[in-house]
Structures are given as structure tokens and as C-alpha cells.
Image (spheres, rainbow, N blue to C red):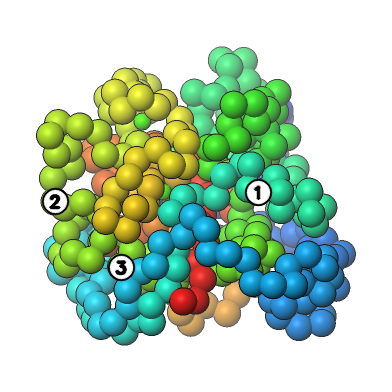
Amino acid sequence: MKTIPLFIWIILCHDASSDCGCQNPDRKTTSDKPALPEQVCHQREHGAHSHYRDYYGELETEPEVVDMSLIPGGTVFVGTDNPHFPADREAPERQVKLEDFFLDKYEVSNDAFAEFVLATNYTTEAERFGDSFLFKTLLSTSEQRDFEDFRVASAVWWYKVPGVSWRHPNGVDSSLDNLGRHPVVHVSWRDAVEYCSWAGKRLPSEAEWEVACRGGKERKLFPWGNKLMPRDEHWLNIWQGDFPDGNLADDGFEYTCPVDGFRQNVYDLRNMVGNVWEWTADLWDANDVSENPNRVKKGGSYLCHKSYCYRYRCAARSQNTEDSSAGNLGFRCAKNA
Ligand SMILES: [Ca+2]
Ligand SMILES: [Ca+2]
């Protein structure tokens, strides 16, 4: 592993963001992009979402709206005029008009994703690529040495590790034991789209996600208000201590927590901010017509700390190419009301 040619190192590290280690474990090449599974291609050739029902013959009636919250639409504010990361285009505050919609109360769990895979034989992009990005504390010292040439240049705590996927989220030898109710991770934007479609749902737009995050409040930093720790209690799963080597886990979790862990607003939404980043449907750049565009992700993760990644605010946003996957990136689904 130490004899990786220089050009591979350049490909892996080229273009990596310099301001925040939590945001950019992107894949850098698309030339070796694996093909979609045959059944998914077949479905796409025959129409949009409803063909899942035809193909699998198991969703003939609309699924019940269980574990989802009705989010009121209307003319609402998103964004902020006080951005912490101007380059992220958090500003300006602006009004958008939304229909009412449903949003999953929880990030999609490993158990839920396993049902999808069982029903469809779906293979995630990380499984087809053969690797995904893992945070360094999940690697042994010798593994860190072996994979040191596969780090993200500006965020050297991210290692691209063979064999890591949603089935082996914390290393190639890890399993899903005791993680059934934890969020599925190492899933790409495309994986998320396929899951939501199978479930009769869709990814939320960024505006929908943000309005749901704000819990009916305007200009608040967090889903519950402006104070990070009301009553000196933890309201989200992020990083306490020094990053990247001193996670105190004062909130009870060094890595992910169960998807129903932290209730954060009146919509009964859990872990909107913190725990894992969540894919949204939106392009980062609406004019991006490239093969592998960046998509907006929201909410920050268990790796975020105010000192370097103050992105566990409703208005905060970040991006990854849509084939990217990492151990702190998941999703939840929405549905038209
Ligand atoms: Ca934590
Ligand atoms: Ca989250």
C-alpha cells in the first residue's frame, strides 16, 4: 500500500476542501463508475417510481404513513443573513413556498435498509466500488499506516478503506450487530434515491429539510431554539472535546446513536442535526449538468464540533458528489401530503 503511484495520490487528494474535514470525502474519479444493478436499470427503462410496485409486486397499495411527521408548508424562510460559512452559501435568508409534506421522523436505519436490500437484492455503490471512507479512530495503528496514502489531503482523518460498506460500517471486520436501530451509513445519494423510491417516498428538497428542522420557528439556529444545550442537557449527537483525537462523548455516543435518539422539535423529528449528515434531493449548483454532480447534505454529524465544523445548524449545508459515501452520511425520506 505504501507504493501507491503519485498520480493516484494526486487523484485522491485533488480538489479536497480546505476548510472542514467533515465535508468532503468525495470519490474523485467517475471513469470506473460501476453500473447500476440490472433490475434498477430495467425499472428505469419502464417508467418512474410506480414500476417498483409492478416489478416487486408488493406495494400495490400506498404504504401507511408511519413514523413520518406532517410538516406544514406555506411561505417560509430558509437560509440566514448571518452565515457562519459564507462559502457554503448559507446566505441570504429567502422566502420559499412549500406544499405540506411528510418527513421521516428518523434517519433511515440499518434494519430498514436491510429490508430494502432483502426485497430488491440492491447493491450499494460503496459495495460496487469496493470501498468507502472511514474515520481514523476506527482503524488500528497498523491499518492507519497501511492506508495512509488513501487519506483526504485536507482532512487526513478520513481513510478510503477497502471492504467498508453499510454492512461493515466500522471497518471491514465489523458487522451490524447491535446497530439495527442506528442509521445506515456508507450510502451514496443514488442509494438513498433508490431506497426512498422503493419505500414509495422521495428525498426531501433542501428547503423542505430546513423548514422541518426549524420546527415552525423562524431564524433559530437549532430545531429547538438558539441555545445549544438548554437545561445543560445534550440535544444532539456531535463531538465534545478536542478534534480529532479527544472525543469525550459527553452526549453518550462516540459514533452514531439510535435513529430515535434525540427528539429535537415539535414535529417529533429525531437527530435532524447531528448523528449523521442527510442527503437532500437538491443539486449544490442548480446548473451542474455533469455526470456526477454535488448534492446538498444537511445537519452535520457525530464528528462535528463548533471549532471546525459548526454545521449542525438548520441553515448550514455542505456537499458531496452523488456517488460519495462515508461513515457519517445517511438520509431520511419525504413524501407528498
Ligand atoms: Ca457524540
Ligand atoms: Ca441527522
Considering the numbered disc 3 on the image, is that residue within a helix, a strand or a loop?
Answer: helix
Residue in view at x 69 percent, y 76 percent:
49
User: Which residue position is annotated with label 2?
Assistant: 226
Residue 113 screen position, x and y as percent: 65, 48
Give the SS element for disc 2. loop
Mark-to-mark CA distance, 2 and 3 = 15 Å
Residue named by callout 1: 113
| Residue 155 position (above or below residue 97) | above
Q: Earlier in the sequence, mark 1 or mark 2?
A: 1
Q: Which residue is mark 3?
A: 211
Q: Is disc 1 surrounded by few (<14), some (14 to 19) or many (20+) residues within 10 Å?
A: many
Give the percent coordinates (x, y) of residue 128.
Answer: 77, 49
Instruction: Identify the amino acid type marked 3.
Output: Val
Q: Residues within 10 Å of mark 3 (few under 14, many from 20)?
A: many
Q: Position of residue 67 (x, y in %)?
A: 49, 55
Left or right: 136 with respect to 70? right
- Left or right placement of residue 141 versus residue 77 in this view: right
Q: Earlier in the sequence, mark 2 or mark 3?
A: 3
Residue drawn at 69 percent across, 37 percent down: 167
Query: Is residue 306 visible in the rendered structure shown here?
Result: yes
Q: Nearer the viewer, residue 3 or 272?
A: 272
Q: Which residue type does callout 1 highlight?
A: Phe
Percent from the top left, x then y, of residue 50?
A: 72, 78
Amino acid type, label 2: Asn
In which quarter of the view is residue 274 placed?
top left
